[in-house]
Image (cartoon, rainbow, N blue to C red):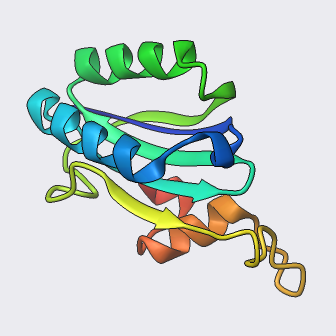
Amino acid sequence: MLKVILYTSDAKLENVEIDILIDKARVKNKRLGITGFLVCHLNGFIQLIEGEEEAIDGLMNEISADDRHSNVRIKESSFAEQRKFPDWEMGLMTISDTEPYYNQSEGESLVEIFCKNVNGTLAEIA
């Protein structure tokens, strides 16, 4: 069984070099057998990671201790038979400061938009 975690964290992205972060994460995730998807937005991150329980727990400990993150919140934690992102050491979606974080006309949160864009609902991902 694979462990799947969906978490959010606060971060000031102007202090984070996303390209370098993603390149390093892809190398590390490949070595650890972790796949997933990262959403970067003006106020931080939303990320889904999946892999062996020990690897995921270790990565979450590192993320929680990383100074680039604050207020790390696990939104969903579960186990799955199959990966949602089997070919992605780290997929990436960046939402710029000119794009809405909350679709007021449709009442969607950023997490819901993320889930819809990866062809699933929050319940399906978790």
Among all residues in the image, which is located at the extreme bottom? 105
Q: Identify which residue is drawn at 76% across, 77% down.
A: 98
Q: Identify which residue is drawn at 56% across, 66% down.
A: 114
From the viewer's perspective, is residue 47 above or below residue 42? above
Among all residues in the image, which is located at the extreme right? 104
Q: Is residue 9 left or right of residue 84?
A: right
| Residue 17 picture location, percent across and down | 49, 46
Q: Foreground residue, 121 or 59?
A: 59
Q: Identify which residue is drawn at 88% across, 87% down.
A: 105
Report the quarter where the N terminus lies.
Answer: top left
Q: Identify which residue is drawn at 19% across, 50% down.
A: 82
Q: Is residue 102 left or right of residue 99?
A: right
From the viewer's perspective, is residue 62 above or below residue 80? above
Q: Is residue 17 left or right of residue 84?
A: right
> Residue 5 falls in which quadrant of the image?
top left
| Residue 68 picture location, percent across and down | 60, 28
Q: Is residue 38 left or right of residue 66?
A: left
> Residue 61 falls in which quadrant of the image?
top left
| Residue 47 picture location, percent across and down | 49, 46
Among all residues in the image, which is located at the extreme left? 31
| Residue 36 picture location, percent across and down | 32, 49
Q: Foreground residue, 126 or 118?
A: 118
Q: How many marks?
A: 0
